[in-house]
Image (tube, grey):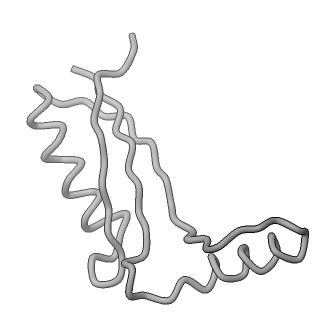
Amino acid sequence: MKFRARIHVMLKADVADVQGIAIQESLRRHGHGVQTVRAGKYFEVDLEAADAAAANAEVAKLADGTFSNPVIERAWFEVVPSEP
């Protein structure tokens, strides 16, 4: 079966987000009333697996080890059947 995974990665709350701070300052200079900005990463992965459980297991490995650094980042994902 074919699946699509949507993987989100963000720095943990206690890790300084230098990129987010830079974006926040730029937005404020342009007159936007932004309180905070946290920058992250987003990935879409198409994969084949025997079933949804196998796809979730594979994506969990990717999310927590390949696409993120679990020491400073948290990752979450969703896996859905891909369209034909």
How many numbered marks does the figure carry? 0
Q: Residue at x 49, y 53 (%)?
A: 42
- Looking at the image, the residue that sits furthest to the right is 30
Relative to 23, 38 lies left or right: left
- Looking at the image, the residue that sits furthest to the top is 84
Relative to 21, 49 lies left or right: left
Task: Give the image location of residue 77, x and y in percent.
Answer: 31, 48
Find residue 1 and report its image quarter.
top left
Relative to 53, 28 lies left or right: right
Specify the quadrant that holds the C terminus: top left
Q: Reply above or below: 65 against 79.
A: below
Q: Reply above or below: 63 against 30.
A: above
Foreground of the two, 45 or 23: 23
Task: Give the image location of residue 50, x and y in percent.
Answer: 11, 26
Q: Residue at x 30, y 40 (%)?
A: 78
Task: Give the image location of residue 66, x and y in percent.
Answer: 32, 65
Q: Residue at x 33, y 76 (%)?
A: 69
Q: Reply above or below: 72 against 52.
A: below
Q: Reply above or below: 76 against 49.
A: below
Task: Give the image location of residue 15, x and y in percent.
Answer: 42, 87
Q: Residue at x 11, y 26 (%)?
A: 51
